[in-house]
Image (cartoon, grey):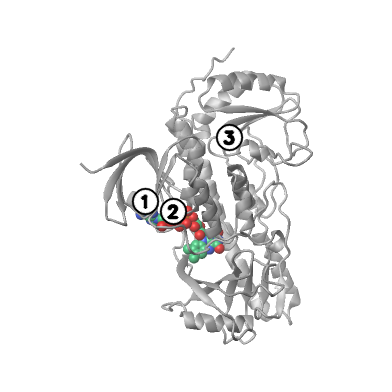
């Protein structure tokens, strides 16, 4: 008999999505086994940055400061168009502060993020992280999934029986292929090669003030290129080469020559660290769930990189999924709750795809305007200003509102989606807004949302607080009560109102004023039964008084 390991959740893939899920499950007190093919975390910086919503999660998980230290200075979320890296620098976008969050975005490379997650996981006793371990195949039945894993070091094969499997195995997901899930959208918009190199140019004043440089040489026979800053020092860079049909990535010798020319330093020491080919795609999986198997991160969606949603969406996916898996595993919630994962996250993935495609067109439109900037400065300036829409996208990052899912819809109008600007709201489905609870600005409302539901009560909401305490004592998915000390936040509830917030920080239900305790009890039950996806007749978890 082959070796068989039993675990509640098997995670395939240890990129940002898979590691975040293992970390989250550990916080909830649930065991997981993570199988990752690679022996180490990524050696390529890939993603450029973490949006505020991701940084908020890192804050709650205790890794925000570490991640931020590995990033560029706060005001450097600007893109620069230039003819060469030693000038002239023709146009910069404007940096803009992220507001409405305790955790502004950070321009930080993915390897540093993975390092922080990996380090945090080393202190998670319930997360069994198995590197150099590949998923070979799996089968699912009504009670679980049996997967075959292959240890790459010594060829050992063994089986894992899990109640749920989450495929966080990236763009070429084997889990997705095995499920037969199709992707909507173009698979290849462009083929790119990222050259990651070391070259110490930290003496230049401009290298720490921009996320990247779009180099468009005046001599049009020379190649355009994008050079991205990697880390806070100014000694590691990423050169992005767009490959034509059949073209190979440039050789190291050619890269060194090109880099020296770009920086205008003929004897600059340049060392290529690695090179990675990747496809620019704009695809969303048709299903995020098939039975007991889920897809998250790049396995579920692939965006053009402009606007930087790849890593961020993966972290949000598993943040949405983790508490639902935990609630169903503990038998406190119906299976229908798990259907809300796709209902909530797929529309966000579609929106992020459209946003990223728009951003890519935004960048492409700059090329002609850059060349013609002296004849047509108005168009050039207008398009440069337009770039702010992709660089400052707090609305896209924090403003998504789930309208179909684990919520009790109160029928209020859904605020229009504004990708650039985040408009705080306590409407069901929205992220509960951040505001500081104390004058010293050390405690944010965001800090309250981690592994339990939270009933946020207005300063005069004695009735809701009492009802919440009764509910908290009887339910198996933990519920905490928080009393607002003041109404200094962007809330629609009155002083005696309350908001029920899910563990992922999204509003499940809202009572604008004092009301019947039964409304809260029913709301709690309805959310765990799947909210708008509930299929069972509700049996209240505590007796409803009539
Ligand atoms: C070169 C490059 C540049 C990028 N630049 C940006 C950017 O600028 N901005 C941005 O937002 N995004 C960027 N991205 C995308 C970003 O890196 C991804 O969105 C992000 O890594 C997705 O995280 P993930 O955890 O879903 O998947 P991944 O990070 O791809 O992780 C998947 C993991 O699964 C493992 N795996 C696969 N199959 C198996 C198997 N059968 N068994 C076990 N393990 C398996 C892989 O080894 C991998 O570690 C870039 C990606 C690449 C490749």
3 and 2 marks in contact (CB < 8 Å): no
* Identity of the residue drawn at 50% across and 35% down: 28
* Identity of the residue drawn at 33% across and 34% down: 143
Left or right: where does residue 323 sit relative to residue 266? Answer: left
- In this rendering, does residue 32 appear at all? yes
- In this rendering, does residue 302 appear at all? no
Q: Position of residue 318 (x, y in %)?
A: 50, 45
- Could you say which is closer to the camera, residue 95 or residue 526? 95
- Disc 3 or 2, which lies upstream in sequence? 2
The image quarter containing residue 247 is bottom left
Q: CA distance from mark 3 to mark 2?
A: 25 Å
Residue that label 1 marks: 175
1 and 2 marks in contact (CB < 8 Å): yes
Left or right: where does residue 118 sit relative to residue 499? Answer: left
Quarter of the image for the C terminus: give it.
Answer: top right
Please, which residue is most extreme toward the top here? Answer: 546
Mark 2 C-beta closer than 8 Å to ligand 1 = yes
- Disc 1 or 2, which lies upstream in sequence? 1
- Could you say which is closer to the camera, residue 426 or residue 234? 234
Q: Secondary structure at mark 2?
A: helix
Left or right: where does residue 225 sit relative to residue 159? Answer: right
Q: CA distance from mark 1 to mark 2?
A: 8 Å
**Measured along the vertical axis of the image, is residue 21 above or below residue 465?**
below
Mark 3 C-beta closer than 8 Å to ligand 1 = no
* Identity of the residue drawn at 64% across and 61% down: 390
Q: CA distance from mark 3 to mark 1?
A: 28 Å
Label 1 Cα crowd, 10 Å radius (few <14 / some 14-19 / many 20+):
many
Residue that label 2 marks: 299
């Amino acid at each position: 008999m082959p070796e068989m390991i039993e675990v509640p959740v098997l995670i395939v893939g240890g990129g940002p999505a898979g590691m975040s899920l293992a970390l989250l499950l550990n916080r909830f007190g649930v065991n997981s086994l993570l199988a990752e093919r690679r022996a180490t975390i990524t050696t390529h910086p890939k993603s450029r940055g973490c949006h505020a919503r991701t940084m908020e999660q890192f804050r709650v998980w205790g890794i925000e400061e570490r991640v931020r230290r590995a990033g560029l200075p706060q005001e450097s979320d600007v893109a620069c168009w230039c003819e060469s890296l030693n000038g002239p620098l023709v146009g910069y976008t404007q940096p803009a502060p992220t507001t409405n969050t305790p955790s502004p975005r950070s321009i930080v490379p993915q390897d540093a993020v993975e390092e922080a997650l990996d380090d945090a996981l080393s202190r998670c006793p319930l997360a069994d992280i198995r590197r150099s371990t590949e998923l070979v195949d799996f089968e699912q039945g009504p009670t679980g999934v049996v997967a075959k894993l292959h240890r790459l070091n010594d060829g050992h094969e063994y089986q894992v029986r899990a109640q749920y499997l989450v495929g966080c195995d990236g763009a070429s997901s084997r889990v997705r292929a095995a499920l037969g899930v199709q992707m909507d959208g173009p698979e290849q918009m462009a083929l790119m090669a990222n050259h990651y190199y070391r070259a110490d140019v930290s003496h230049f004043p401009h290298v720490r003030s921009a996320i990247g440089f779009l180099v468009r040489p005046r001599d049009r026979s020379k190649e355009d290129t994008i050079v991205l800053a990697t880390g806070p020092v100014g000694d590691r860079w990423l050169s992005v080469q767009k490959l034509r049909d059949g073209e190979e990535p440039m050789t190291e010798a050619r890269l060194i020559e090109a880099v020296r020319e770009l920086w205008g330093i003929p004897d600059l020491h340049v060392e290529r660290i690695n090179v990675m080919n990747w496809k620019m795609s704009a695809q969303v999986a048709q299903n995020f769930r098939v039975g007991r198997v889920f897809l998250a991160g790049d396995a579920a969606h692939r965006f053009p990189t402009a606007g930087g949603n790849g890593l961020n969406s993966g972290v949000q996916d598993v943040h949405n999924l983790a508490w639902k898996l935990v609630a169903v595993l503990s038998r406190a919630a119906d299976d229908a709750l798990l259907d809300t994962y796709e209902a909530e996250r797929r529309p966000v993935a579609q929106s992020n795809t459209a946003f990223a495609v728009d951003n890519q067109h935004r960048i492409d439109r700059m090329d002609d305007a850059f060349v013609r900037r002296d004849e047509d400065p108005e168009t050039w300036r207008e398009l440069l200003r337009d770039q702010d829409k992709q660089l400052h996208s707090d609305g896209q990052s924090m403003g998504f509102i789930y309208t179909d899912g684990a919520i009790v819809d109160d029928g209020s109008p859904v605020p229009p989606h504004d990708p650039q600007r985040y408009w705080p709201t306590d409407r069901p489905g929205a992220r509960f807004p951040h505001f500081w609870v104390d004058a010293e600005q050390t405690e944010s409302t965001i800090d309250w949302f981690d592994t339990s539901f939270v009933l946020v009560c207005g300063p005069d909401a004695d009735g809701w607080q009492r009802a919440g305490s009764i509910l908290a004592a009887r339910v198996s998915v933990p519920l905490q009560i928080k009393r607002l000390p003041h109404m200094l936040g962007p809330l629609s509830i009155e002083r005696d109102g309350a908001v029920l917030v899910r563990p992922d920080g999204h509003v499940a239900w809202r009572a604008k004023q004092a009301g019947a305790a039964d409304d809260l009890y029913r709301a709690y039950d309805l959310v765990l039964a799947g909210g708008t996806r509930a299929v069972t007749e509700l049996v209240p978890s505590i007796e409803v008084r009539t």
